Amino acid sequence: MNLRDLKYLIAVAETRHFGKAADRCFVSQPTLSGQIKKLEDELDIKLFERTNRSVKITPVGETVLQHAYQIMEQADSIMQLAHSHSDPLAGPLRLGAIPTISPYLMPLILLPMKQQFPQLRLVLSEEMTGVLLTRLHNHEIDVALLATPVDDQDFQTVPLYDEPFWLAYPRDHAFYTQENISRRDLEKTDLLLLSEGHCLADQAMSVCRLQNRDNQGDMADLRAASLETLLQLVAAGMGSTLVPALALRGSWTTGSGIVTRKLELPDARRRVSLVFRKTFPRRQAIDALADLIRQQLPTSVKVVAGKRASRKQNQ
């Protein structure tokens, strides 16, 4: 067994097709199939169930696959170390971020990162929380920017900042002339939410004490796939919504007819953190990224002082 065999194993597992896996590995299909067969003979197990129509990985194959991911990651780390021994912060860092963080935080850190760590290459992807956690488990990304607690023994967490929520509503909304906005007011408001799967929707419902969105009448049908679309609905007078503080830096705040107001409630905030695998070998890159983010944050959020990673987030 060698690294090439593990590379073939991963390719077949991810494509579920020997021909596509062979193309991906730049070898012929007979060569790849033969190596997989030799690996199965060597391990004395079946890694895949093959039929004329499909290729499915076996349960024991799934277990071997997870070890293969870890081994390939460590091998890649060795190569990066060999190529960049003079700079431990050199090479790619695959960062995943949720859509309600990435557009507002990335512009703050990209230029400073290039200046401070010119050899570090950020590879950014934007997905919802569940997808990012799956990709972390599958070693497809190295670290994720999340805004929900993660309780997983395979992961470590570095808290970055607490971000307050602001209420956004059109100028002709009843809140415009209201001096104080209470929790009871929020429970009754025409709250607009992001579509299912966005953690911001769950956080908004929690702050506003909404137990079930289905009970909110016509508003239940108004959900948006992005925060920008949600704010367009607010500007059109369709309702109000909660906005994280960093999003207030967006262009939508000018001439949109939307009024924003900080919620003076103790739990009207979210904790943003970096989450990564315990086995990830480049901890120094994670710490450098965390420190850089903290340095560039505006005063609209509360920075969490740097500390050792913990498995659970505290909110």
Image (cartoon, rainbow, N blue to C red):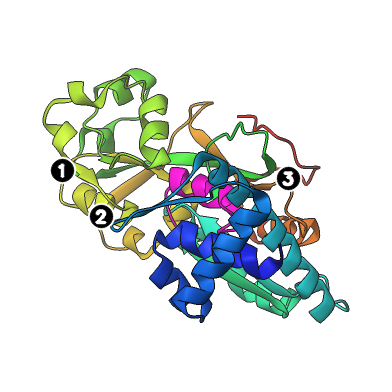
Judging by the rendered image, the residue that carries numbered circle 2 is: 229
Quadrant where the N terminus is found in the figure:
bottom right
Residue, disc 3: 278
Question: Is the residue 15 above or below the residue 227 in the image?
Answer: below
Q: Residue 115 or 182: which is nearer the viewer?
A: 115
> What is the magenta range?
126-144
The disc labelled 1 sits on which kind of residue? Met
- Judged by depth in the image, the label closer to the viewer, 2 or 1, is 2
Residue 178, percent from left and from top: 30, 30
Q: Are marks 2 and 3 in contact (CB under 8 Å)?
A: no
Q: Badge 3, how many Cα within 10 Å: few under 14, some, many 20+?
A: some
Instruction: Mark yes or no: residue 90 visible.
Output: yes
Asked if the stretch drawn in magenta spans residue 133, the answer is yes
Residue at position x 24%, y 28% in the image:
189
Distance from label 3 to label 1 (Cα)?
Answer: 45 Å
Whichever of callouts 2 and 1 sits on the residue coming sooner in the sequence is 2
Q: Earlier in the sequence, mark 3 or mark 1?
A: 1
Q: Mark 1 falls on what kind of element?
A: loop
Residue at the location (80% across, 59% down)? 284
Say which of marks 2 and 3 sits in front: 3
Find residue 238 and name its label: 1
Q: Is residue 298 among the parts visible in the rendering? A: no
From the viewer's side, name the closer residue of 143 and 21.
Answer: 21
